[in-house]
């Protein structure tokens, strides 16, 4: 996959999520959670775990689970949401691997709407990584830093997440190559 392909697929939202994507999403969730708690009148003195902390815990816990069991747990969590009166699945607090279980839908447990919501969340996390990486401007150093982040994200992902995102071993190689970029020409990096 060339640099141009990586950039193109990222703007279409179809590559990596990982630690940086999760970090960006966690920040977004923490802000939303704080606003929600403030609106609900919750005391600042009470001890709470932030949305980003909960997401980090979910990612860690879901890494060790058997994929079929994780899909069943994810189905149960969504059913619990519906039982509490929610009309649409809220997937923003699910781990990347739980989202992949919905998108892949290997046991036929999830609806098309749930799959679309999970796919949309994974793409949003990917866009967050790209936006964060390019926020300081477009330069060779920025792209090299992004390549490093992309390689780390690839390594942090489960095989299921990689499959959903279209990651291949070539994706990892290209990210590492981008990370080692010292050239001043972006055209030198294209396949």
Image: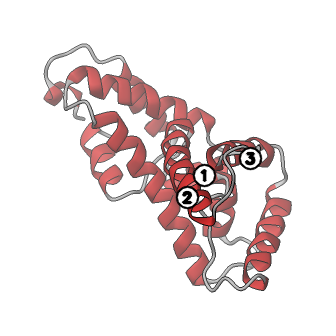
Residue indicated by mark 1: 161
Q: Cα distance, mark 1 to mark 2?
A: 5 Å
Classify 173 as above or below 6: above
Crowd band around label 2 with a 10 angstrom C-alpha radius: few (<14), some (14–19), many (20+): some
Taking the image as shown, residue 155 lies to the left or right of residue 191, namely right
Q: Residue at the spot x=48%, y=51% of the render? A: 125
Q: Are marks 1 and 2 in contact (CB under 8 Å)?
A: yes
Taking the image as shown, residue 168 lies to the left or right of residue 185, namely right
| Residue 90 place in picture, x, y as percent | 62, 70
Who comes first in sequence, dot 1 or dot 3? 3
Q: Nearer the viewer, mark 1 or mark 3?
A: 3
Taking the image as shown, residue 108 lies to the left or right of residue 12, namely right
Give the mark count: 3
Classify 23 as above or below 112: above
Classify 86 as above or below 91: below
Task: Using the image, tell me which numbered label, if any, was put on residue 164.
Answer: 2
Q: Nearer the viewer, mark 3 or mark 2?
A: 3
Task: Using the image, tell me which numbered label, if any, was put on residue 48.
Answer: 3
Residue 141 vs residue 132, the one in the foreground: 132
Q: Cα distance, mark 1 to mark 3?
A: 29 Å
């Amino acid at each position: 996959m060339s640099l141009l392909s990586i950039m193109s697929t990222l703007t279409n939202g179809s590559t990596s999520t990982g630690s940086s994507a999760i970090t960006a999403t966690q920040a977004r969730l923490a802000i939303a959670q704080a606003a929600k708690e403030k609106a609900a009148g919750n005391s600042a003195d009470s001890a709470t775990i932030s949305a980003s902390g909960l997401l980090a815990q979910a990612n860690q816990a879901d890494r060790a689970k058997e994929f079929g069991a994780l899909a069943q747990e994810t189905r149960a969590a969504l059913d619990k949401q519906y039982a509490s009166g929610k009309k649409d699945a809220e997937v923003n607090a699910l781990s990347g691997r739980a989202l992949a279980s919905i998108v892949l839908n290997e046991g036929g447990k999830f609806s098309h709407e749930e799959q679309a919501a999970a796919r949309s969340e994974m793409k949003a996390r990917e866009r967050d990584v790209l936006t964060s990486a390019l926020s300081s401007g477009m330069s060779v150093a920025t792209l090299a830093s992004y390549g490093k982040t992309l390689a780390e994200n690839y390594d942090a992902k489960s095989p299921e997440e990689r499959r959903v995102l279209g990651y291949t071993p070539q994706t990892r190689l290209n990210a590492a190559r981008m990370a080692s970029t010292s050239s001043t020409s972006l055209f030198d990096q294209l396949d």
